[in-house]
Image (cartoon, grey):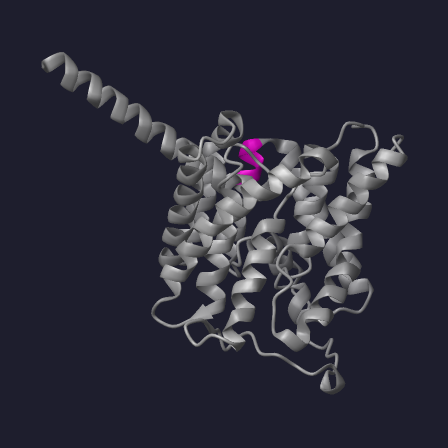
Amino acid sequence: MIIHINLSRVINRETLTWLMVTTLKGISQVVLVENAVSGFIIFAAISVASVPLGLITLFSAVIGTLIAKIGRADPNSVNQGIYGYNSVLTGMALYLFLSGEDRWIIALIGAAITAFFTAAMIHFMRQTGVPILTLPYIILTWFFLLTTYRLTTFQLSPDLTPQSLSNWTLNIKGEANWLDGAVNGIGQVFFLDYSVSGILLFIALFWAGWRIGLYAMVGNLAALVTSYGLGGEHSLIFKGLYGYNAILTIIAVSLVFNENHKTGLIFGTIAACFTVPISASIVTWLLPYGLPPLTMPFVFCTWLFLGARKVLPAF
């Protein structure tokens, strides 16, 4: 009996350790990193800005991981946190972009559905050789937000207001705060507009690898310069709303999915710059629906450049 109890404790301890480590990896996979320590720093960065948002992040990652584990998904993918990051983003987005007392329940349900959708997309896109990236999160979040126009259970946040393009005017006035812009880009990956969180997020990236942190800084700078040079709205530029897609894109194109390291940084920087006009286009396209662009510019540009490499292998 004593031996049985001790073995049970060991198994439970191992299971909890596995769940904790894999959950943190799922959080870190949002920025294409597989590192539990980085995941913990990211969790801390979110919690510093908002404790409720930090809890939603943690629970969403746990839900995605457990669904994949119980569903007997590929163990390597599960252990890498592949089934956690889309659930994390969906949970966070629904919590922030919906209103009402029940939004946290909807957010966690959305995180669970995203895990199933992630599994389905991995299956359907396996033969293409194209990574799913954050597409499950994007599609499901948009679908949930659009239900607010037809179902009273779902209430859209007042911050997301549909606007008519015929009455739209571009206002590029405002203070150019380059210091804030340097750290806000990485923060916006997790919907954060808080400098301390941005600094912590960069620390998380550098912990995972100095190239990841450096390339993220290059991508953010590329987006700042490009959006400023093209005459973007200062309020959006220096809040990091042009930077976060560029950061994800340069990490994906230059490091994670790069087989030719010689041209990786150059090719990734070009891709990061390209996210700026793509972001502006997608924001305009979604304006009448009041939907945020999320990470669609990152997905589009990364797919575009990775696809080009299939035909142009020198890049």
Q: Is residue 202 visible?
A: no
Q: Residue at x 48, y 73 (%)?
A: 157
Q: Residue at x 37, y 34 (%)?
A: 20
Residue farthest left in this picture: 1
Q: Nearer the viewer, residue 32 or 81?
A: 81
Residue 53: x, y in percent? 41, 57
Residue 116: x, y in percent? 50, 45
Give yes or no for residue 52 being in the magenta stretch.
Answer: no
Quadrant where the C terminus is found in the figure:
top right
Q: Quadrant of residue 108?
A: bottom left
Would you place residue 206 above or below residue 280 in this image? Answer: above
Q: Quadrant of residue 146?
A: bottom right
For residue 308, side relative to residue 210 (left or right):
right
Residue 270: x, y in percent? 82, 47
Quadrant where the N terminus is found in the figure:
top left
Q: Residue at x 63, y 50 (%)?
A: 135
Q: Residue at x 31, y 23 (%)?
A: 14
The dominant secondary structure in magenta is helix
Would you place residue 140 above or below residue 217 in this image? Answer: below
Residue 199: x, y in percent? 53, 48
Q: Quadrant of residue 67?
A: top left
For residue 239, side relative to residue 45 (left or right):
right
Residue farthest top in this picture: 3
Q: Nearer the viewer, residue 157 or 152?
A: 152
Magenta stretch, residue numbers: 204-208
Q: Is residue 69 visible?
A: yes
